[in-house]
Image: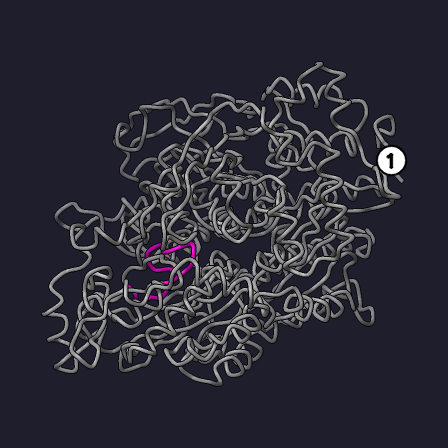
């Protein structure tokens, strides 16, 4: 600690660290122009940084230099059970590796607090029309995941600094927003800003509270867990001024889907955004959180709002103590983090977005940044020919564009009381009008917090939603994460037999092809009330603003505007029905359970040999422990733009004819318990079979007779030129010990923060990936697994180089941050082409991790060296 800047915090018995004084000592007058992000980072440096490098690190912030790394020490790590579990599987494997080399495995523990929430394991096998859906789904979850939950329970008792929220309690981001984040932390008598990293790309949800919280992959989280600084270079900090006020009937979902398209076009990938202005000040924290949650969809690392009176009101609403609310206000105003203290903040880039321009909006098909104003459904070819659709329905057939899943799901929207209450009011109005959901629509309500059920009950809206089939199926990340469960077998068979175009409509944040359900051809994101409306319409071919949802007793058509509640009614009900006692009633007993670890257990996990969920990781063995030569690499795939982590390592249901399905069957698992790819990521033998297993993949090495790219999880093995399923190709290359490379287009690795998108390719033998651009989280995950990310220079790509997959590749040059390396392409004709590429190891820390072979390998080396030295 740099005690020179430690001072008493006025009105409290606590101290704080005065970053303003430290900054002003370097450059007088600089503090006033610093953005919020820089101020929080400066405090972190003053409180935690080695005094020997403090001045230089602060100078980088003040002068906005990006030539060197500086350290950041997040206060917490939050995890969901998929990536959190795989991170802890890695640490359990690390303990084994340490023990095998004579070290003390009990000394391998998270150094910073880790909060693991079991929220990604529940599938909606029973829809919301079943009044017993919650109990049935939880029983199925417990049965399927017994191996996983056994391991998670062991981690709770075997590792220090790990708290676990058990299944059935909500989504990590919503719990973080409503309870876990104190906004201002206290430790050893010092108050300081809360900061965290989370093993999910939507961790910026809590940025709405003014907390720097970013999504990272499991590997980067492990680095932070183990007490290492998260070394970084100053990010681009972009100011986004929100002007105007939303028009009547416009939800936060409409705003964020419009913002997502706008910000993607503004190329904010990797940036920290700071929302400010009159429009931002008028938004409550629920609306702010909806905007912050979707940061990964517009590509930003963080999406910050400032601390203000709205922040304090939200803390009171969600049951925080009066003392904590007072501390947040006092600290923010003293430390220069209060909204009024940032009027002169200066940004490298300033964007402006008019909230009054937002219209009722969905997103889709296929991408969350594909804005779809509902007024344009017919013009875009989405809606139309409703008469033909209704004729099919009259014949007892599923209609064209059938909505087979309508889900109110995801922390994006269920953490926003206005959105949830609006859905309940629309359901009430629909019930009064005698409307019902179409029988083929699988409906569900999966809030991210148990408090939602309490305030819906208080408002009298829970029974209204249940009447339309939106009963509560679980408190978890369900449909949005691809855990939508099985369809009615008759509906599924009809979709297959007729090759029917069927879709999902959900209030989530992701709608990539193949993610939501294997038989939902595409998916559309919508606000919760619109999800209810589509359950009644039953087809995406419905013009939701204009077509009749039904008719009253006099034959008058009933349209959406007849059902939509007024803003005044929504706000009045939120004010009267959403109460602090709901949140206290939910969270006080939940967190008493979380910190009760129970009896201690062995520091080494007793691996279950037949488990398909938990298996000792192989990262210290065989080829992975060997040298990466970056020579003679063959391409596993040549891919286009916008490859998502869902393409690379899907998370949805495992089908019986997939490589993973065949493996699980061979292990004696019944098909009904195959579960999802995501839940099996603690077992590398199952998880690696998911690598590029998405049926929507287009590998440009595999073509139809007419030259078009063939769709599917396929690869072409060279030099034979034989096309086979991707997993068989990977097995072939693994047997040959053939080093591999992947060639890709723009924005490689969009989407979720899943580390298995990096682990799977590394286990396959991939040593390098050359793309036109990378999403931040996936790039760091690749480095954490010892895979080298390389970027084509502008104007060069797979097309200009005429790459067809018959080549072999070498990478030549010294690997330093941002260095120019040479990609040597050896063509089958004998020609050699040398292509300059940029090394995307962006910092000295990343070079160190890569050269060690990955995060875990470096930690093991450092740990053993430190033990030997002592």
220 sits to left or right of 281? right
Q: Residue at x 62, y 47 (%)?
A: 311
Q: Nearer the viewer, residue 46 or 438?
A: 438
User: Could you tell me which quadrant the N terminus lies in?
Assistant: top right
Q: Residue at x 77, y 51 (%)?
A: 101
Q: Residue at x 32, y 56 (%)?
A: 513
Q: Position of residue 438 (x, y in %)?
A: 27, 77
Q: Is residue 759 visible?
A: no
Q: Residue at x 51, y 52 (%)?
A: 754
Q: Nearer the viewer, residue 139 or 96?
A: 139
Label 1: which residue?
A: 8
Q: Position of residue 837 (x, y in %)?
A: 42, 25
Q: Is residue 513 magenta?
A: yes
Q: Is residue 258 magenta?
A: no
- Occupied quadrant, residue 592: bottom right
User: Could you tell me which quadrant the C terminus lies in?
Assistant: top right
How packed is label 1: few (under 14 Cα within 10 Å), some, or many (20 or more)?
some
Q: Give the residues in magenta.
A: 506-520
- Occupied quadrant, residue 482: bottom left
């Amino acid at each position: 600690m740099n005690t020179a800047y430690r001072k008493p915090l006025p009105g409290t018995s606590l101290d704080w660290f005065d970053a303003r004084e430290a900054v002003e000592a370097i450059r007088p007058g600089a503090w006033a122009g610093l953005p919020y992000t820089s101020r929080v980072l400066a405090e972190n440096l003053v409180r935690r940084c080695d005094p020997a490098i403090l001045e230089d690190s602060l100078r980088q912030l003040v002068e906005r230099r990006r030539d060197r790394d500086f350290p950041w020490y997040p206060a917490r790590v939050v995890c969901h059970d998929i990536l959190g579990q795989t991170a802890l599987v890695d640490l359990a494997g690390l303990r084994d590796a340490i023990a095998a080399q004579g070290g003390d495995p009990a000394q391998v523990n998270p150094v910073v607090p880790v909060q693991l929430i079991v929220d990604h394991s529940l599938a909606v096998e029973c829809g919301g029309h079943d009044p017993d859906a919650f109990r049935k789904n939880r029983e199925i979850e417990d049965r399927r995941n017994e191996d996983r939950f056994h391991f998670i329970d062991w981690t709770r008792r075997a590792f220090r600094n790990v708290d676990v929220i058990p299944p059935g309690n909500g989504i990590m981001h919503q719990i973080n927003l409503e309870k876990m984040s104190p906004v201002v932390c206290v430790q050893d008598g010092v108050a300081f800003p809360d900061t965290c990293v989370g093993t999910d790309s939507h961790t910026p949800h809590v940025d709405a509270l003014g907390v720097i919280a970013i999504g990272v992959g499991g590997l980067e989280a492990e680095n932070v867990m183990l007490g290492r600084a998260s070394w970084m270079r100053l990010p681009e900090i972009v100011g986004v001024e929100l002007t105007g006020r939303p028009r009547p009937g416009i939800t936060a979902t409409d705003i964020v889907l419009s913002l997502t398209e706008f910000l993607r076009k503004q190329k904010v990938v990797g940036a920290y955004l700071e929302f400010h202005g009159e429009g931002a000040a008028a938004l409550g924290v629920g609306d702010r959180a909806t905007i912050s949650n979707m940061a990964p969809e517009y590509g930003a690392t963080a999406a910050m709002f400032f601390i203000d009176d709205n922040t304090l009101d939200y803390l009171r609403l969600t049951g925080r103590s009066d003392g904590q609310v007072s501390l947040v206000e006092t600290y923010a105003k003293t430390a220069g983090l209060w909204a009024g203290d940032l009027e002169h903040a200066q940004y490298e880039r300033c964007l402006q977005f008019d909230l009054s321009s937002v219209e009722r909006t969905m997103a889709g098909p296929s991408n969350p940044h594909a804005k779809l104003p509902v007024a344009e459904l017919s013009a875009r070819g989405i809606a139309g020919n409703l008469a033909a659709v209704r004729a099919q329905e009259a014949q007892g057939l599923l209609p064209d564009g059938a909505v087979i899943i309508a889900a109110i799901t995801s922390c994006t929207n269920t953490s926003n009381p206005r959105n949830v209450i609006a859905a309940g009011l629309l359901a009430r109005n629909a019930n009064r009008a005698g409307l019902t959901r179409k029988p083929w629509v699988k409906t569900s309500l999966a809030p991210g917090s148990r408090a939602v059920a309490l305030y819906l009950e208080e408002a009298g809206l829970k029974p209204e939603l249940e009447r339309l089939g939106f009963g509560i199926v679980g408190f978890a990340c369900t449909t949005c994460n691809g855990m939508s469960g099985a369809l009615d077998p008759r509906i599924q068979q009809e979709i297959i037999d007729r090759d029917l175009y069927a879709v999902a409509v959900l209030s989530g944040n992701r709608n990539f092809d193949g993610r939501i359900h294997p038989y939902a051809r595409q998916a559309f994101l919508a606000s919760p009330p619109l999800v209810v409306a589509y359950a009644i319409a039953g087809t995406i071919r419905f013009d939701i603003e204009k077509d009749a949802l039904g008719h009253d007793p006099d034959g008058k058509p009933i349209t959406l505007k007849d059902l939509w509640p007024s803003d005044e009614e929504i706000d009045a009900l939120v004010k009267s029905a959403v109460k602090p006692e709901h949140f206290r009633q939910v969270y006080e007993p939940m967190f008493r359970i979380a910190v009760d670890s129970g009896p201690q257990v062995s520091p080494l996990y007793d691996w279950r040999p037949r488990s398909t969920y938990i298996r000792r990781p192989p990262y210290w063995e065989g080829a992975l422990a060997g040298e990466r030569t970056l020579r003679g690499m063959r391409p596993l795939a040549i891919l286009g733009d916008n490859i998502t982590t869902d393409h690379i390592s899907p998370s949805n249901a495992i089908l019986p004819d997939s490589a993973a399905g065949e493996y699980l069957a061979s292990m004696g698992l019944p098909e009904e318990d195959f579960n999802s790819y995501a839940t099996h990521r603690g077992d590398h033998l199952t998880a690696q079979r998911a690598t590029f297993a998405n049926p929507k993949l287009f590998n440009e090495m595999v073509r139809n007779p007419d030259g078009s790219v063939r769709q599917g999880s396929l690869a072409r093995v060279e030099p034979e030129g034989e096309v086979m399923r991707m997993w068989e190709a990977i097995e072939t290359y693994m047997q040959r010990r053939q080093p591999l490379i992947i060639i890709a287009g723009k924005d490689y690795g969009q989407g979720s923060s899943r580390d298995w998108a990096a682990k799977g390719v590394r286990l396959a033998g991939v040593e390098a990936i050359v793309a036109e651009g990378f999403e931040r989280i996936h790039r760091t995950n690749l480095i954490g697994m010892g895979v080298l990310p390389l970027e084509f220079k502008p104007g060069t790509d797979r097309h200009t180089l005429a790459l067809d997959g018959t080549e072999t590749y070498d990478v030549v040059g010294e690997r330093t941050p941002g260095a120019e390396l040479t990609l040597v392409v050896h063509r089958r004709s004998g020609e050699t082409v040398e292509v300059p590429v940029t090394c995307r190891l962006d910092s000295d820390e990343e070079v160190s991790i890569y050269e060690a072979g990955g995060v875990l390998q470096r930690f093991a080396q450092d740990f053993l060296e430190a033990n030997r030295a002592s």
